[in-house]
Amino acid sequence: MDIRPILSTLRRHKFTACLLIAEIALTCAIVCNAVFLIGQRLERMDMTTGIAEHELVYVHMAYIGMPSDGMARSAADVAALRQITGVKSVTMMNQIPFGDSSSNMGLRIDQTQQKDTINSAQYFGENMVQTYGLQVVAGRDFQPEEYQDLDKVFAGLRKGDLNALPKSALVTQAVANRLWPGQSPLGKQVYVGQGIPLTVVGVLKQLARPNQFEKGAQYSVINPIRIAMSQGAIYVLRCAPQDRDQVLKEALAKLKALDPNRIVLNKGTEDQLRHNYFRNDRAMAGILLGVCIALLVVTALGIVGLASFWVAQRNRSIGVRRALGATRRNILSYFQTENFLLTTIGIALGMVLAYGINLFLIMHYELPRLPAIYFPIGAVTLWAIGQAAVLGPALRAAAVPPVVATRSV
Amino acid sequence: MLGYYLDLAVRSLRRNKILTALMIVTLALGIGASITTLTVLKLLSGDPLPEKSANLFYARVDPNPLEGYVPGQTKPDSIMSYTDAMNLMHAHRAVRQAAMALIDAKIDTQHPNDHPYFADGVMTTADFFALFNAPFQYGSGWTADDDESRATLVVIADFLNNKMFGGANSVGKTIRIDDRDFRIVGVLKHWAPQPRFYATDLGGHDYGDGDAVFMPLKTARSLDKGPQDTECYASVSDLQHLESAPCEWLGMWVQLDDSTAVANYRMFLDGYAKQQVALGRFKRSETSLLDLMSWLSDQQVVPNDAKLQTYLAFGFLLICVVNTVGLLLAKCLRRSREIGVRRALGATRRDIFTQFMVEAAIVGVAGGVLGLVLAVLGLWGVRHQPAQYASLAHLDVEMFLVTFAVALVASLIAGLLPAWRACVVAPAPQLKAA
């Protein structure tokens, strides 16, 4: 196909050609960045927590009046909850991934440090590894005698009595790699704040913090501390995925029967927590997707509209070409090639613009750089849309009979 | 003459209905998206206290250790320790001053069938209400003496008063909060500044309903109420006695009525920090005193998603306008002959130009009307989004007018190039070709 006649025609329709190029360039730039943003959201929503997410239900309650024997009552609750059919394991935890509150602590590898090396989530509760379905990749889980009661820990902290405090910790691989890169973390000491030493006894494959993932999604530490419901603990029950609704219902009934003097603050499954946690991201991804589709449709309609008028305007010259021997195929491919040329120029400009928009977003919204893979994908999409949009008008052009050349219209 | 142009424009638009519909719909989509996002952005970045925001200032000092400190670059923490807040409060260097933190308040409805529930609350000092112009329906705030005597009294919001007392004057009655009786001294009128500027860094949400209860800081603390957010700058063993702990958990607002007062307070704050450095309590002498709107922009309260959506919508509108330009242009080039005839019959270039601009404006107005419908639909969609500000998204009169302004401007810009091309058509060749 000779493109010289196309170029000389376009030179006489500079304005229309430029508009089409501008529209394609803008669409290309915006769609590339929007799709990239959608990808970012999906990636966020895809994060792993390391826990058996589909098997957990939770109940968070508060007392109306504070009981004095919180720890004993909680132990009775847990024993009762274990009796529910289908329940594999029960624990009382201070927090849960994707929950709305979080308990965090600063970790140091040296007592003389003035600032914390990392900020990590601080989980505690008995029997957590089994109930959350965590994977211990090195070392061991806590022994029963290692656990301390939270109220005694607080009392110890107030008096400065280190013996009342837990001495061991389970850390995630992410924490271990950050604190002691390339070394075995087992037996190493880590300090909470300036004073409290903990010995690492085991390493977890993964355990996400409850929220604030920007501080390091996998920075979590478990301490062997028992916590009572009156201290804000959450009941977490593990069961088979299909039993969750039934288990939750029975657990609520049982807890109510044991002590009616408390209110349920929150309840549900871990899957619901995840769903709720990412609902903003899901909404944003949906909006971006909607805008992308609307943009591509508008651009396609624009191409159809312009090409239609172009064909109508050049009816006569098409007739002349046909009369001089051009086949229908020639006419069809003329318009297709013309569109391809305009789209290509538009895409080239669009890429530069897309890069510019990305730079702006990097500066203002801490986004990563647009990966190069988006450029060819964007180009192919726009080429395809351009060709699809121009096909109708081009077929109409190809259908123009040669006899038009002899008419005066 | 305008009537004639309108008639011509309508005829021309009706001649090609599909194309006209296409132009109107694309323009309406762009306008609908822009107005929806702009309404949300305006709502989020608005001034929560327009009559007073210029006189309200947020004070910060920096008690952190020296490590990681770059003089002139490290910003002070966004909240303050009790010691510093009280030192600044008792200095009385501003017209009004208040320290505050957020709490959860367990409210017992006293109805036999109702469970108690948790409501948002603020623990603060006496000046809070006058400082922020919080309007009272009944009663008033408490006094500085009540602060010191740890009086168990409370100011409640209108919605809590409606719920508990059916909207009647409840001043003097008691309300049970956290298993203790509080005497109600005041009931606020509806007061929910958007964003909730006074709490942006205290651990609460930035938008939504206002707080339900307001109680004296020392009273709340004597009942062991903890703040929603606590940040400690040295190792702590005792989080119960926050007053003496090296922890920050209070926000400090002051009212300064003119630039001299601001300059004086800034000097006082700097002096205070230097004095604390001399005493060995502080290692850094950095301070900050930002007015309300600067504080909000410093805190980046407006969610990035809302900004991105607005950029996206205007990008979309731009493409829609380019699209309309292309279609109008194509249309006008097709009508060269008609233009030639009109010119030959005596129409001036100005006449032709006006005629085409009128045609574009009609497309714009139609696009604006349809865009308004889309914006109302879009805002309905926003209200069903999972965001704190969702319930606030409504179209106001201003945005209603802005819609038509945007539509007209967009369509006239779109019409400019085609109209110019139309009016430069030379009549003679067009007539010859016919």
Image (cartoon, rainbow, N blue to C red):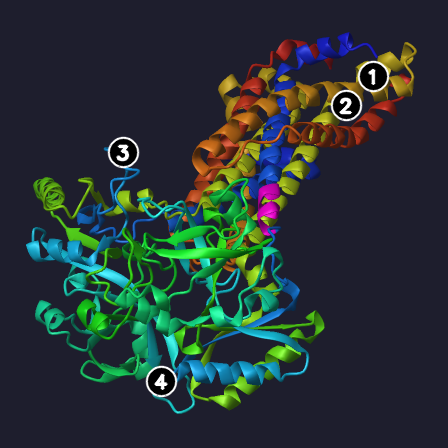
Kind of residue at badge 4 = Ser
Label 4–label 1 contact, CB within 8 A: no
What crowding class fits label 3: few (fewer than 14 Cα within 10 Å), some (14-19), or many (20 or more)?
Answer: few
In the image, which residues are magenta? A38-45
Task: Work out how far the residue at label 1 is from the one at label 3, CA to CA, in angstroms.
Answer: 73 Å
Residue position marked by numbered label 2 in the rendering:
A311
Residue at 52 percent of width and 23 percent of height: B353
Pick whichever, B352 or B369, lies toward us.
B369
Q: Are marks 2 and 1 in contact (CB under 8 Å)?
A: yes
**Amino acid type assigned to the residue bearing label 1 in the image:** Ile
Which amino acid, by three-letter code, is at mark 3?
Val
Q: Are marks 3 and 2 in contact (CB under 8 Å)?
A: no
Which three-letter amino acid code belongs to the residue tagged 2?
A: Val
Q: Is residue B198 visible?
A: yes
Nearer to us in this view, A231 or A178:
A178
What kind of element bears circle 2? helix
- Disc 3: which residue: B70
Point 58% across, 52% down: residue: A282
Mark 4 and mark 2: span between their CA atoms? 87 Å
| Residue assigned mark 1 | A318
Question: In terms of image quadrants, where is residue A35?
Answer: top right
State the image coordinates of residue B42 (x, y, percent, origin top left). 39, 47
Q: Label 4: which residue?
A: A68
Secondary structure of the residue carrying numbered label 4 = loop
Q: Residue at x 50, y 26 (%)?
A: B354
Q: Is residue B124 magenta?
A: no
Main SS of the magenta part reads helix
State yes or no: residue A42 in magenta: yes
Rendered image quadrant of residue A303: top right
The residue lying at 75 percent from left, 18 percent from top is A338
The kind of secondary structure element at disc 1 is: helix
**Chain containing the residue with disc 4:** A
